[in-house]
């Protein structure tokens, strides 16, 4: 008889292996050793997220626990992998298997970028998020980006390239925008093969500052992508994000956005396009902690094969956060009978004068729309592609960065061609 | 152009078309009238290849081809066009892109060269203007937020751009005011010629004042029960269907 402790034992063993790796290498790991040691104690006692935890119910990490990941070494990407970074004007910061690669990277002007050690910042919560504790314990590199007040830093292309070595990497980035600053961060996670990519990004958005975070996760077919983002937004600031998930075998993007000052806003739009037996989870926790704050989440899922999409969206409205405007919509298009979508909206509202709405739909392609297109001469496959693209438009259309959007359109078209 | 013989069709085992015989020679416009539920839309859907309709017998030959064996897009490329009774909304699909995709897909299927964006827009603007459609209807999403009349005009715009050999207009006049009706009729009349036929489904004589048909057929219970010249439409307008439908009414 298989005991229910089976998956738990595997998770425990995996956590122990990570901790052992930490102890073997701790004297050579760069950055704040105290923060790291605290995180190691957490991993040693708490382990990895298990299937009995409410927040991880839909995304069992067992397959991840059964894989093994050696520490990443310095590596060179293939020309083909490098060519997957779209040609977008801006400063490139390239990380290969989690390590900063200066020859492939550009030099920023008008703002500071520091690399060579993890940029821990102070927004992450290793005690609450187990994967963040894991990241903190093993982080070896990252970018600390600091945009001075009133500065438009333009576009940074933060590219994570995974060469396909069976390694685990845990980059740790911290991005600070001082008052009135602006930045577009094109965040790419690209790779081949099987590996673990466990990045943590923290954003400190000061009053009136705007960061646009445009993410494309197109990891290798056997990869685990487990990322956590924290964004803290002060008065009148905006964290504006769109996350496109295409790759990986088991993926989760978790985003914690806290609207800390009046009139702060967060947009957490996303699209997950999955096939075969892919599993991807988009989990958001938006906390409205000041009056007149707004959050918008439009999440679209296109699922084929036996893939499984998960969306968990939590909106917390503190008592003080009157006139909060929260909107959340999750929609799934199931293109095969075996595909599955799990959607869990959660509203916790402690203020009395708020406008919060959420909704979820799951459906197939509309037969009438398909016939209408075909009756005009559009072949069936092309008609399907048009309708899928149309389904995504509400999430894609708000992206104003033309080059980034074009690159995402191209990535979506490529996904459609190769889908299973 | 179109030759239908003994066509029978059903939906979910329920017989709707019970043996239709109809020949539309090249260059002719025929009208079909008939009570609600008599099978007019079903006939247009069966001819254009919508799923869910079982053809239980009979044949339909279009421009020498057995169209019932073809995919909907092949029928369109062969020159068949259906103006829908209820045009479908396509949120997230730009009307101009939709038209260009359709036009180029048909041209490709026929081995003709595709139109580039500039050539296409010039053509689309000209046709839209002819139909008194504001340019912005090309920029909007297909039929989304269109009024009933705008939707019907958009169908006629598609027809004008795609230049079919046979157009089936399924109650394209319903919900149109008299000015819009004239515009739609002009759109059809502009295509009239030896290479164009039309099957106009309508309840009202007034459309047939503007698109004068060569023949008028009355459909009842999935059969054509009477055929005649344009005067038949006048007789129906005056006396209703009861006078011409045998065991009904
Ligand atoms: N999808 C459907 N399922 C079942 N019955 C249908 C369906 N569509 C039409 N019918 C039936 O077929 C008959 C003919 O409908 P239709 O062709 O729409 O008539 P008309 O266009 O002449 O008003 C009606 O009895 C109608 O109820
Ligand atoms: Mg009808």
Image (cartoon, coloured by chain):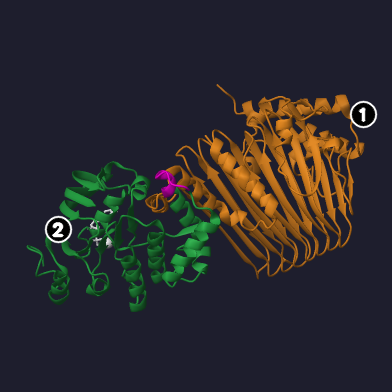
Chain colours: A orange, B green
Task: Work out how far the residue at label 1 is from the one at label 2, CA to CA, in angstroms.
Answer: 91 Å
Q: Secondary structure at mark 2?
A: strand
Q: Is A5 situated left or right of A21 in this image?
A: left
Residue A208, position as x, y percentages in the image? 80, 64
Residue A237, position as x, y percentages in the image? 78, 62
Residue A52, position as x, y percentages in the image? 63, 38
Residue B68, position as x, y percentages in the image? 26, 44
Classify the position of the C terminus of chain B by image quarter. bottom left
Report the residue at 91% width, 39% height from top.
A32
Q: Residue furthest front?
A: B194
Ligand 1 falls in which quarter? bottom left
Q: Is A27 situated left or right of A228 in this image?
A: right
The image quarter in which residue B193 lies = bottom left
Q: Which residues are magenta?
A: B106-113
Q: Is residue A162 above or below residue B169?
A: above
Examine the rendering and report whether any part of residue A171 can be seen.
Answer: no
Residue B224: image tag: 2
Which residue is denoted by mark 1 in the rendering? A27
């Amino acid at each position: 008889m298989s005991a229910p402790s089976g998956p738990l034992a595997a998770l425990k063993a995996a956590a122990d292996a990570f901790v052992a790796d930490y102890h073997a290498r701790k004297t050579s790991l760069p950055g704040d050793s105290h923060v790291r040691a605290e995180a190691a104690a957490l991993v040693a006692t708490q382990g990895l997220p298990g299937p009995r935890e409410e927040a991880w119910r839909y995304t069992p990490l067992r397959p991840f626990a059964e894989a093994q990941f050696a520490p990443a070494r310095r590596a060179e990407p293939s020309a083909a992998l490098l060519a997957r970074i779209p040609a977008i004007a801006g400063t490139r910061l390239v990380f290969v298997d989690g390590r900063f690669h200066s020859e492939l990277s550009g030099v920023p002007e008008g703002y500071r970028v520091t690399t060579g050690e993890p940029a821990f910042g102070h927004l992450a919560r290793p005690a609450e998020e187990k994967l963040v504790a894991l990241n903190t314990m093993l982080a070896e590199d990252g970018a600390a980006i600091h945009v001075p007040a009133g500065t438009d830093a333009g576009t940074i292309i933060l590219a994570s390239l995974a060469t396909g070595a069976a390694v685990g990497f845990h980059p740790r980035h911290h991005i600070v925008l001082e008052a009135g600053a602006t930045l577009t961060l094109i965040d790419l996670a690209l790779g081949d093969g099987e590996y673990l990519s466990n990045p943590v990004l923290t954003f400190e958005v000061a009053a009136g500052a705007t960061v646009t975070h445009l993410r494309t996760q197109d990891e290798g077919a056997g990869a685990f992508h487990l990322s956590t983002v924290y964004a803290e937004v002060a008065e009148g600031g905006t964290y504006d994000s769109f996350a496109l998930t295409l790759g990986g075998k088991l993926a989760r993007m978790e985003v914690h956005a806290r609207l800390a000052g009046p009139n702060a806003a967060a947009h957490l739009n996303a699209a997950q396009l999955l096939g075969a037996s892919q599993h991807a989870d988009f989990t958001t926790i938006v906390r409205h902690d000041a009056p007149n704050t707004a959050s918008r989440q439009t999440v679209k899922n296109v699922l084929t094969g036996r893939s499984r999409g998960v969306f968990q969206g939590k909106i917390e409205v503190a008592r003080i956060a009157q006139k909060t405007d929260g909107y959340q919509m999750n929609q799934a298009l199931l293109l095969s009978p075996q595909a599955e979508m799990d959607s869990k909206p959660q509203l916790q509202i402690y203020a009395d004068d708020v406008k919060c709405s959420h909704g979820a739909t799951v459906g197939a392609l509309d037969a009438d729309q398909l016939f209408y297109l075909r009756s005009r001469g559009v072949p069936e496959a092309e008609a399907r592609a048009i309708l899928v693209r149309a389904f995504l438009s509400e999430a894609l259309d708000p992206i104003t960065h033309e080059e980034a959007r074009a690159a995402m359109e191209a990535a979506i078209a490529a996904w459609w061609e190769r889908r299973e | 152009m179109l030759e239908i013989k003994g066509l029978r069709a059903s939906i979910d085992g329920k017989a709707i078309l019970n043996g239709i015989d109809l020949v539309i020679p090249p260059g002719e416009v025929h009208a079909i009238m008939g009570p609600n539920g008599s099978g007019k839309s079903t006939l247009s859907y069966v001819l254009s290849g919508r799923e869910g309709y079982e053809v239980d017998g009979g044949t339909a030959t279009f421009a020498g081809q057995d169209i019932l064996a073809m995919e909907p897009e092949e029928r369109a490329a062969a020159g068949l066009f259906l103006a829908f009774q209820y045009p479908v909304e396509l949120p997230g699909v730009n009307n101009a892109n939709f038209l260009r995709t359709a036009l180029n897909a048909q041209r490709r299927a026929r081995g003709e060269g595709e139109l580039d964006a500039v050539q296409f827009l010039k053509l689309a603007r000209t046709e839209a203007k002819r139909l008194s459609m504001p340019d912005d209807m090309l920029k909007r999403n297909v039929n989304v937020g269109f009024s009933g009349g705008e939707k019907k005009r958009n169908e006629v715009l598609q027809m004008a751009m795609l230049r079919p050999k046979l157009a089936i207009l399924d109650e394209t006049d319903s919900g149109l005011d008299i000015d819009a009706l004239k515009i739609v009729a002009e759109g059809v009349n502009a295509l009239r010629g030896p290479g164009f036929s039309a099957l106009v489904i309508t309840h009202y004589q007034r459309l047939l004042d503007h698109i004068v048909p060569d023949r008028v057929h009355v459909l009842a219970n999935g059969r054509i029960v009477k055929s005649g010249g344009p005067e038949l439409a006048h007789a129906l307008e005056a006396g209703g269907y009861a006078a011409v439908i045998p065991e009904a009414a």
